Image (spheres, coloured by chain):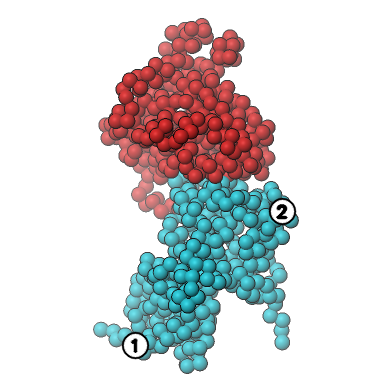
C-alpha cells in the first residue's frame, strides 16, 4: 500500500502556513490577543513567537477595534499584517475598521492604496460555547465589496489557502471553524498553494449536487456516503472561497445533476446558501429537476443546552432525510 | 519664544511661508464654500476655516515621506501636507483628475504620493490606522513619522483609547494631534466629558501630552517640532491638544449658531490665525504691506487656477465604476 502522506491537524496546518510565509516575507507582522508566548487560544500560533519574537508577533490586550485598525493601518503603509480576532465573534468589536476602512480603501483611493491585511477568526459551534462564541456570520463579509472571504474545511485546504491569502494585494477574511482545529488530514511536506476562487469537488456524483462550507463539508460527505448505500449518487462541492466564488464549477455541477441542496451552518435568510440558490435559478433554471433546497441552522442564537444546539444545527440524518424527499420529485417542464 | 524666533532670518522666512500656506487653506475653503452654495459641488463638505494654524504648524515640520492621517474636516490637512490645490478641488468636484479619481470626495481623498493617507468619514477611525502605519514605519526602520489629526469629538471614542494605548506601549513614531474646536457637530465638549483637558489624557497611557494655542502657528509649529523629533528618535508618541475653533458650522449648510453664541464666534475671530501671522510679519518688519499683497495675489491666483483646472477636468468614465474594488 502506498503511503498516503503526512497527516497533521487543521490547526497545525495553519501554523505551518504562517511559519513558511513569515520566513518567506519578512514584512509580515501578526497582531492579536494571546498569540505570543501563549501560542494562541486555539494553539493557532504555537511556536511562532519563539522563532519570530515580539517584533513580528504583536501580543495585545483585549482590544479588537484598536488591534484591527492598527493591522489595517500597517498594511496601508506597506507592511503585510495579520490580525487574529481569535473567535470570529470578536471581529464584531472591530467591524467598522474591517468594513469601512479595509474593504473600501482600494476603491476610495482609486487603487493607489492597498491594504494587504488578513483578518483571521474561528467561527461556529463547538462544545456548547453558547451564543457569544458560536456565530457563523461569514456571509456578512461576503456581502461587502472589497473583501475576499476564505472558508477552509480541511488541513490541506487551510494551509494552501492561508498561504495564497498571504500573497493577496488586499484584505482577506480567513474564517476557520473551531471544531475543525483538532481534525486531521494529509498535508504534504513540500510547499503548495491553492488559488482563491477554485471550488473543490469533494465527491463526484450524478443525481444531486450538495454544496457545503467549512464544517458542513464533513456532514455532507457522510450524508453522501449514506445515500450511496441506497443508490443515490451525490456530488459534494466545497466552494472553499466565498469571494471570489467558483461559479462555473458550481453551475456545471447543478446542470449535470439537476438538483441542488446547500448545507450551511448559518441561518438561511439572507445567507450564502440563499446566494447559491439564486445562482441555481439564474444559471441552471432549465436544468432543474427539483426545487433547490437549503438545509441551514435554525434562526435562533446558539443555545447552550447540547440538546437544543444539536436541534439547531444541520445533522447528517436531517440532510439524508431531506434529500430523500427531493429525490422523489421530478419537475416537469412545461 | 515666538518673538525670539522672529529676530532670526530663518524664523522670518518660516513665518512668511506659514502665512502663505494658511492663506491658501483659507482661500481654498472660502472658494469651496462659494462653489458649494452655488450647487456646483456634489456631496457634503466640512470646512477648515479658522483652524489653519494647526494643519500648517504641524505639517511644516514633516518630510515628504512622513505620513498624515486626517479627518472629515481634512481639506486643509491635504493642502498642508503638499497635495496640490487642483487635485484636491477636482476630487471635491468628483472629477477624474481628483486625488481619488472622483471615487472618494471630501471625506475619502487619498494622496499617498504626497504622504497623505486620507481624510476619513468615520470619526476616530484614523487613530488606529495611523498607529498601524507608525508600527509599519518602526518595523521598516526608515525613520518615518506619522501624524494623526482628529477632533476633540474623537477622544471619547473607543478608537482613541485603544489606539493611543497601543501607540504608547509599543513606543511608536506617531504624533496624535487633537484639534479641539470645542464642538463635535453641535455637542459642546464640556457636555460630553467631565475631563475637558485632552492633553491630560496622555497620562492615562503613560505618554506625553501637551496643550498649545492652536491659533498661533508658531506655537503649533514648535510643539509639533518637538513631538516629531521625539517620535523620530524613538521617543514614542506625543498627544498635542491644539485649542482652536471653526468659524463655520459643522458642515456647509449648518449655520452653527443653534449651539453657540455669535459673541463666542466673534471672540474667536479676534484670534484669527491668518491675521495674527500677518500682523506679526508687519510688526516685526519681516515683511511690508506691498510684499504681503504680492503674496496674497499669488495665492489668489493659485486658487483661481485650481478652480479652472477642476471645472475643466473630465468626469470619470461611467464604465470605470467597477474598477479598483480589490
Q: Which chain is red?
A: B
Residue A224 in view in this figure: yes
The quadrant holding residue B27 is top left
Whether discs 2 and 1 lie on one chain: the answer is yes
| Residue at disc 1, secondary structure | loop
Secondary structure of residue under mark 2: helix
Residue drawn 50% across the image and 60% down it: A89
Residue under label 1, please give it.
A329
Within 10 Å of disc 2 (Cα), the crowding (few <14, some 14-19, many 20+) is: some
- Quickly name the residue at label 2: A52
- In percent of width and height, residue A166 lies at 60, 58
Image position, residue B74 (x, y; %): 44, 34
Other-residue count near label 1 (Cα within 10 Å), few / some / many at <14 / 14–19 / ≥20: few
Q: Distance between the Cα atoms at labels 2 and 1? A: 58 Å
Subunit under mark 2: A
Camera-side residue of A80 and B95: A80
Image quadrant where one finds the C terminus of chain A: bottom left
When the figure is inspected, residue B303 is found, relative to residue B201, above or below; the finding is above
* Residue pictured at 51% horizontal, 79% vertical: A219
Residue at the extreme right of the image, as rendered: A50
Q: Hey, which quadrant is residue B308 in on the image?
A: top left
Chain A: colour as depicted? cyan
Amino acid at each position: 500500500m502506498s503511503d498516503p502522506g503526512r497527516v497533521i491537524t487543521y490547526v497545525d496546518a495553519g501554523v505551518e502556513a504562517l511559519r513558511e510565509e513569515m520566513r518567506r516575507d519578512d514584512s509580515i507582522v501578526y497582531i492579536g490577543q494571546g498569540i505570543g508566548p501563549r501560542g494562541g487560544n486555539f494553539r493557532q500560533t504555537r511556536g511562532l513567537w519563539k522563532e519570530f519574537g515580539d517584533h513580528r508577533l504583536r501580543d495585545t490586550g483585549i482590544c479588537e477595534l484598536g488591534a484591527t485598525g492598527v493591522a489595517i493601518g500597517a498594511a496601508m503603509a506597506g507592511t503585510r499584517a495579520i490580525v487574529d480576532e481569535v473567535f470570529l465573534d470578536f471581529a464584531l468589536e472591530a467591524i467598522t475598521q474591517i468594513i469601512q476602512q479595509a474593504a473600501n480603501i482600494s476603491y476610495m483611493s482609486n487603487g493607489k492604496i492597498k491594504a494587504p491585511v488578513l483578518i483571521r477568526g474561528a467561527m461556529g459551534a463547538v462544545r456548547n460555547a453558547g451564543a457569544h462564541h458560536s456565530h457563523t456570520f461569514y456571509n456578512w463579509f461576503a456581502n461587502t465589496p472589497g473583501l475576499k472571504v476564505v472558508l477552509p474545511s480541511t488541513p490541506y485546504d487551510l494551509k494552501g489557502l492561508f498561504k495564497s491569502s498571504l500573497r493577496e494585494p488586499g484584505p482577506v477574511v480567513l474564517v476557520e471553524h473551531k471544531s475543525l482545529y483538532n481534525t486531521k488530514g494529509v498535508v504534504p511536506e513540500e510547499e503548495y498553494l491553492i488559488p482563491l476562487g477554485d471550488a473543490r469537488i469533494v465527491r463526484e456524483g450524478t443525481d444531486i449536487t450538495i454544496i457545503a462550507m467549512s464544517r458542513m463539508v464533513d456532514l455532507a460527505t457522510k450524508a453522501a456516503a449514506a445515500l450511496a448505500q441506497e443508490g443515490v449518487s451525490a456530488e459534494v462541492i466545497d466552494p472553499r472561497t466565498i469571494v471570489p466564488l467558483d461559479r462555473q464549477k458550481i453551475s456545471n455541477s447543478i446542470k449535470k445533476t439537476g438538483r441542488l441542496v446547500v448545507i450551511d451552518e448559518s441561518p438561511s435568510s439572507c445567507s450564502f446558501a440563499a446566494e447559491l440558490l439564486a445562482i441555481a435559478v439564474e444559471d441552471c433554471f432549465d436544468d432543474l429537476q427539483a426545487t433547490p433546497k437549503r438545509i441551514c441552522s435554525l434562526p435562533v442564537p446558539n443555545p447552550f443546552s447540547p440538546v437544543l444546539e444539536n436541534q439547531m444545527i444541520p445533522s447528517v440524518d436531517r440532510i439524508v432525510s431531506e434529500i430523500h424527499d427531493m429525490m422523489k420529485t421530478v419537475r416537469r417542464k412545461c | 519664544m515666538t518673538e525670539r524666533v522672529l529676530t532670526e532670518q530663518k524664523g522670518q522666512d518660516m513665518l512668511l511661508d506659514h502665512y502663505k500656506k494658511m492663506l491658501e487653506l483659507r482661500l481654498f475653503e472660502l472658494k469651496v464654500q462659494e462653489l458649494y452654495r452655488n450647487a456646483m459641488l456634489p456631496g457634503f463638505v466640512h470646512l477648515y476655516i479658522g483652524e489653519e494654524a494647526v494643519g500648517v504648524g504641524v505639517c511644516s515640520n514633516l518630510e515628504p515621506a512622513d505620513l498624515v492621517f486626517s479627518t472629515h474636516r481634512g481639506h486643509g490637512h491635504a493642502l498642508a501636507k503638499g497635495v496640490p490645490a487642483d487635485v484636491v478641488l477636482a476630487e471635491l468636484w468628483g472629477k477624474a483628475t481628483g486625488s481619488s479619481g472622483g471615487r472618494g470626495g471630501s471625506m475619502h481623498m487619498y494622496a499617498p504620493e504626497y504622504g497623505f493617507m486620507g481624510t476619513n468619514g468615520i470619526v476616530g477611525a484614523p487613530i488606529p490606522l495611523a498607529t498601524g502605519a507608525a508600527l509599519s514605519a518602526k518595523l521598516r526602520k526608515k525613520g518615518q513619522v506619522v501624524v494623526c489629526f482628529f477632533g476633540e469629538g474623537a477622544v471619547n471614542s473607543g478608537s482613541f483609547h485603544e489606539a493611543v494605548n497601543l501607540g504608547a506601549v509599543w513606543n511608536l513614531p506617531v504624533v496624535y494631534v487633537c484639534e479641539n474646536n470645542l464642538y463635535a457637530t453641535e455637542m459642546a465638549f464640556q457636555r460630553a466629558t467631565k475631563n475637558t483637558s485632552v492633553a491630560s489624557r496622555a497620562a492615562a497611557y503613560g505618554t506625553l501630552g501637551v496643550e498649545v494655542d492652536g491659533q498661533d502657528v508658531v506655537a503649533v509649529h514648535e510643539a509639533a517640532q518637538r513631538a516629531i523629533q521625539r517620535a523620530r528618535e524613538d521617543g514614542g508618541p506625543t498627544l498635542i491638544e491644539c485649542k482652536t475653533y471653526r468659524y463655520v458650522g459643522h458642515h456647509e449648510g449648518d449655520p452653527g449658531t443653534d449651539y453657540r453664541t455669535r459673541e463666542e464666534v466673534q471672540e474667536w475671530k479676534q484670534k484669527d490665525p491668518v491675521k495674527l501671522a500677518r500682523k506679526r510679519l508687519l510688526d516685526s518688519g519681516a515683511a511690508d504691506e506691498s510684499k504681503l499683497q504680492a503674496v496674497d495675489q499669488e495665492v489668489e491666483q493659485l486658487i483661481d487656477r485650481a478652480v479652472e483646472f477642476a471645472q475643466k477636468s473630465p468626469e470619470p468614465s461611467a464604465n470605470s465604476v467597477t474598477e479598483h474594488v480589490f
